[in-house]
Image (cartoon, grey):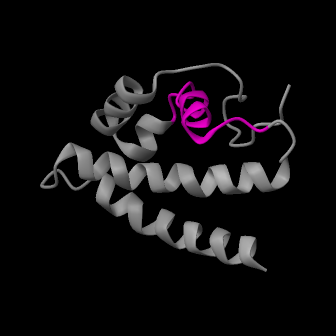
């Protein structure tokens, strides 16, 4: 099934991305792009679990960034870069990666 393949590929990219996020030798844009791959994997899982009324990817990211635990996972500089780009919105419980709709 295609969605299974996409999810598997996203999970693989997610694990590779964590190492890139903390590589200070790389430009911030590259490190932020790597962390977006982590969020893509989470988005795919969320969309698959709750496809009805799911938000767009950019809105999803802004909701995920409300949880400041991303500082630990991406590093403060990457987190701030993404917040500046996507903003922060409510809609996903802190500690969860699932948007369950309204």
Q: Is residue 50 left or right of residue 59?
A: right
Residue 78 magenta-highlighted: no
Please state, as top left, top right, bottom left or bottom right, where the C terminus lies in the image: top right
Please state which of residues 94 and 98 is positioned toward the viewer in this rendering. 98
Residue 64 in the image: x percent, y percent? Answer: 59, 34
Q: Residue at x 35, y 51 (%)?
A: 33
Residue 54 in the image: x percent, y percent? Answer: 77, 39
Q: Is residue 89 above or below residue 13?
A: above
Please state which of residues 85 and 80 is positioned toward the viewer in this rendering. 85
Q: Residue at x 67, y 78 (%)?
A: 5
Please state, as top left, top right, bottom left or bottom right, where the N terminus lies in the image: bottom right
Magenta part of the protein: which range?
54-69
Residue 6 in the image: x percent, y percent? Answer: 64, 71
Q: Residue at x 38, y 33 (%)?
A: 82
Quadrant in which residue 23 is drawn: bottom left
Q: Is residue 51 left or right of residue 14?
A: right
Quadrant in which residue 57 is drawn: top right
Q: How many numbered marks, from 0 up?
A: 0
Please state which of residues 73 and 51 is positioned toward the viewer in this rendering. 51
Residue 68 magenta-highlighted: yes
Q: Residue at x 40, y 58 (%)?
A: 18
């Amino acid at each position: 099934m295609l969605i299974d393949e996409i999810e598997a590929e996203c999970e693989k990219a997610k694990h590779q991305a964590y190492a890139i996020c903390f590589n200070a030798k790389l430009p911030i844009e590259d490190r932020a792009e790597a962390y977006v791959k982590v969020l893509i994997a989470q988005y795919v899982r969320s969309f698959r679990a709750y496809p009805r009324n799911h938000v767009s990817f950019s809105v999803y990211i802004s909701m995920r960034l409300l949880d400041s635990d991303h500082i630990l996972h991406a590093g403060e500089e990457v987190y701030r870069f993404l917040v500046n780009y996507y903003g922060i919105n409510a809609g996903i419980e802190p500690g969860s990666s699932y948007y369950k709709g309204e």
